Image (cartoon, helix red, strand yellow):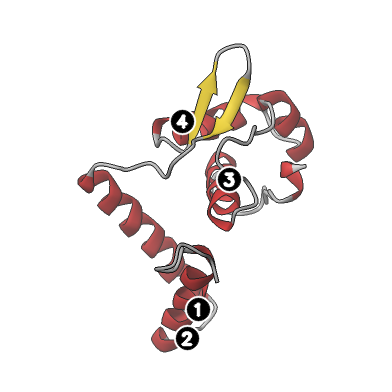
Amino acid sequence: MISRGLHVDPRDAVPIWKQIEEGMRRLVASGALKPGAPVPSVRDLARDLQVNPATVVRAYQRLVDAGLLVVKRGEGTFVAEGIPTLPKAERGRALVEGALRYASTAVTVGASRDEAAHALDSAFSRLAPTKEGEKK
């Protein structure tokens, strides 16, 4: 069940739809959701996470717009078969936005720049394919 890998915290300053979007991205990046795999229906995920279905719709729509999910009429929503290629400007904005969120977390927990860089490198190594096409 995918919703077990997704968690939302209503006390978090990050909007719920953004938490769902980022959680789905993490599941895909980690391989927990494989290309072509179905994702939970809006209604099922909203029920499991105890959020408004419109919140899940917003997160799913952003992921569809980003090319990470595809909708097959009459069948449901699925993980896209390939890693989406974003236009250079959009890719840059996504990286800056993610870096700012990460840096904010690192600063608020009192991490040094070196500690933050090491943690980022470690996470990247776990998620990004190696030159041989395998994950570490």
> Disc 4 or 1, which lies upstream in sequence?
4
> Disc 3 or 2, which lies upstream in sequence?
3
User: Which residue in the protein does label 4 denote?
Assistant: 64
Q: CA distance from mark 4 to mark 2?
A: 34 Å
Query: Residue 110: horizontal and vertical position, in percent?
Result: 51, 83
> Amino acid under label 3?
Met
User: Which residue in the protein does label 2 denote?
Assistant: 115
Q: Give the label, 3 or 2, closer to the camera.
A: 3
Q: Of the numbered discs in the image, which one, if any, rests on residue 2?
A: none
**Residue 64 appears in the rendering:** yes
> Disc 3 or 4, which lies upstream in sequence?
3
Q: Secondary structure at mark 2?
A: helix
User: Which residue in the protein does label 3 denote?
Assistant: 24
- Asked if labels 2 and 3 touch by Cβ distance under 8 angstroms, the answer is no
Q: Residues within 10 Å of mark 1 (few under 14, many from 20)?
A: some
Picture residue at 41% right of the left edge, 70% below the top: 103
> Amino acid under label 4?
Val
Q: CA distance from mark 3 to mark 4?
A: 12 Å
User: In this view of the protein, which residue sits in the foreground, 103 or 22?
Assistant: 22
In the figure, 133 relative to 62: above or below?
below
Q: CA distance from mark 1 to mark 3?
A: 21 Å
Image quarter (top left, top right, bottom left or bottom right) of the C terminus: bottom right
> Disc 4 or 2, which lies upstream in sequence?
4
Q: Of the numbered discs in the image, which one, if any, rests on residue 119?
A: 1
